Amino acid sequence: MLAFTVKRLGVALLVALTVSLITFSMIYVSGDPAIAIAGEGARASDIEAIRKFYGFDRPIIVQYVDWLAGALRGDFGRSFTLRQPVADIIFARLPVTILLGAAAIGFALVLAIPLGVLAAVRPNSMLDRFALTVAVVGQAMPTFWFALTLILWLGVTWRLLPITGSDTWQHFVMPAIALGYFVTPAVMRLTRAGVLEVLASDYIRTARAKGLRPPTVLFKHALRNAIIPVVSLAAVQFGFMLGGSIVIETIFQINGLGYLAWESIQRKDLPTMQAIVLVLAVIYVLLTLLADLLNAFLDPRLRAA
Amino acid sequence: MKRLHVVLAGVLIALAAVSDPAAAGKKDDTLVWATDRDNPIADPFFLNTRELVVIGHHAWDTLVVIDPKTGEIKPLLATKWAWVNPTTLEMELRKDVVFHSGKPMDADDVAYTLNFVSNKDNAIANFALLAFIKSAEKVEPHKVRINLHNPFPPALANLAGLGFIMQKGHYDNAPVKPDGKKDFGAVPPNGTGPYRIAEVKPGQSILMSRNTSYFKGGYKGEPAISKVLFRTIKDANTRSAELMTGAIDWIWDVPKDQAERLKANPALVVENAKTLRVSYLQFDAHGISGQKFFTDKRVRQAVAHAINRPSLTKNLVGPASVVAHSPCHPDQFACSDKVARYPYDPAKARALLKEAGFPDGFEFDLVAYRDREFTEAVIGDLAKVGMRPKLTYVQYTAFIEAVRKGRAPLAHGTWGSNSIPDVSAMTAHFFSHGPDDITKDAQVKQLIDAADSITDPEQRRAAWQKVLERIAAESFWVPLFTYAKYYAFSKDLAFVPTSDEIPQFYAAKWK
């Protein structure tokens, strides 16, 4: 297990480094960053002054090493436009995004696990087909379109929920549904497959032969084993939601990390954009590492793989 | 299943009971307006967004204003003014103006502000527009003298657009940034305007409340609505949805298709109004991009004849848009459309191309950054006469870099002139050998220098006419159309859009 952990940690570190390199190079992808900061109508002398002030005139490798050293100390520089340290802004916004991600994953699990179990208990029944339909629709429907549909019905037509903001729990209902529904199919299919597999196993047959009641067999014996891969999938999906909430936070005007990312792109606030991408990527890498280690801990066969 | 229905109904009723839409509208006497821009600060000198220009004209006052209906310069903080000579302007000030802090305004405040903004080291966002000021000094307690570096006829227009007057010493105690420079934008706002800034949530909202001590009898009048709240809502669909629910009262920049749909809502008013922004095509007339096609005047004229500009304005932009013939907006002082015109004529375009040696057209690069549908319409028209533009659609930053570095054989751009209704704010910007001038025509530059050293309005108009005639005759640009904006707002709101893109909420009222 130790060798496996070390190997996985090494891979995670390499991925994080690669992400940092790509993130840093973002600054030059959309053109000269000095022009981006100077904005429309700036004079050549203003642009040159900005280039010198931010050190864009230094060799790129020097800029990268400097930036990486700062990032390792938690210093991502200052936001061009919000005029605060980027780290402060990110840590102020992160809780909102984590709350949204948690609500969304909670919604996805509450919807997907019962549906997956019911589909597995009655395979090929109408219920199974209904669950399949939910899964297909969830995967096929673009998140932004589903979000707008929710706004149209729950916000505009029936006026049940507020559309924008993050002041109260009601503000999180539509975004959590929109974000959570997208990951529901994966969780539901994994639950269904896991329960089906476990229900066909010998120990379940033994449990039934002992005369245990079907709910006891299902929930106490079958589901407990079938749910293990779902837990690790949920961890990875949670990471995906933190990064994937950009669209949802923008549509619902939630002041989280995703919305901050969108704001930064619009304002060409490069230090903030770089830091968000790096922070989200590192969180995602860590959650994936956690899921790998959890799976390996639960299933010794994976450690040898 | 029945039980499920009961549960669902219960949840919906509970949600409806606790739902509390944000305070907005006539009932709360709060006008809520939203755009997609976020404003981390509320100082119009240190953030160059349209929203802060709007907020600037509500929370601060300028010495003079431009009446957008007539284009006339009218008094505001200054009661009268006179040119002592072409580089000296004297202005008399009102005596009944009080800052939100409670201090009465006088010549010291005006001199302090103008000396501050014209000091390059203070790096205000629109320095170039106020850089004509050499210095300002108090003559009497309510009389100020403004000295100019050189004669600058649009001085009053620029002062009206961005010359917000701050209290003396306003920026003296600005916090210091880690780089040792002062963070002037972080100073709490304090103006003389009809509204005072009550709360700033960086990047989210700016709340203004009515200034009950605002002077009477001025151009802006006394505001009727007690609070004006600006909110950032990035997504255009969400803004429309919030407008429909009544959570916000006013939006602009509504896409044409959405505007058409919002028109069907009886609770809303949708209007299309002109703006000072102009859409244009800019040629690499010297072939510095390596593609030499547009060095030939006949090819440039072929492009002008190939584009169906009346159709673009009518079908894509909106009813308030008009075809542009000169590189300026028809509402700008000295902008004239009495120049060589290139009506839509594909046959003539083909003939000109043939004459220039391109009977089968040619392939070239076209760079654009804004309103892709307009660019695609242009491409469609050019394709009809055999030209094959390869579109590179980029962010503004990359666009301006491509133009300035000579990588754009043809550029489709737009310019809003910072809302300054004077020809120099656009034509001089693009033809005075500055960074955005890729034409660099010596004759045009000479004519502009001559035109911008004349202060007499009629003589200046005549001098600018020569500039515009030369540009049109040589087809250095193809001016396309003026922009028109769709506004949508609550039917409870009495509001009139203006072409300067500075909505006058101080003049709005509830019906």
Image (cartoon, coloured by chain):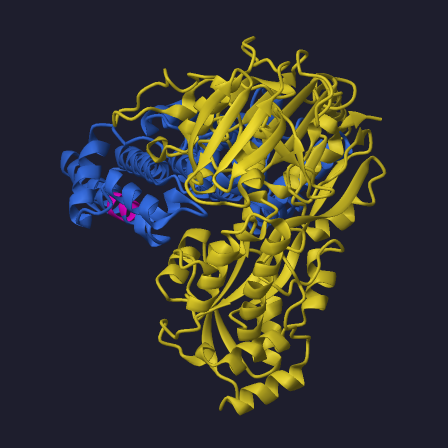
Residue A111 visible in rendering: no
Q: Is residue A256 magenta?
A: no
Q: Quadrant of residue A278?
A: top left
Question: Which is more toward the observer, B461 or A121?
Answer: B461
Q: Residue at x 50, y 23 (%)?
A: B110
Chain shown yellow: that is B
Number of marks in the rendered image: 0
Q: Looking at the image, is A97 positioned above or below residue B108?
A: below
Q: Quadrant of residue B313?
A: bottom right
Q: Residue at x 28, y 42 (%)?
A: A49
Q: Residue at x 32, y 37 (%)?
A: A271
Q: Position of residue B205 (x, y in %)?
A: 56, 25
Residue A92 visible in rendering: yes
Q: Position of residue A163 (x, y in %)?
A: 65, 30
Which colour is chain A painted? blue
Q: Position of residue A74 (x, y in %)?
A: 25, 28
Q: Which part of the image, by quadrant, shows the N terminus of chain A?
A: top left
Question: Which is more toward the observer, B305 or B136?
Answer: B136
Q: Is residue A21 magenta?
A: yes
Q: Main secondary structure of the magenta part?
A: helix
Q: Looking at the image, is B347 positioned above or below residue A228?
A: below
Q: Is residue B225 left or right of residue B35?
A: right
Q: Residue furthest front?
A: B84
Q: Position of residue B193 (x, y in %)?
A: 61, 21
The residue range painted magenta reads: A20-24
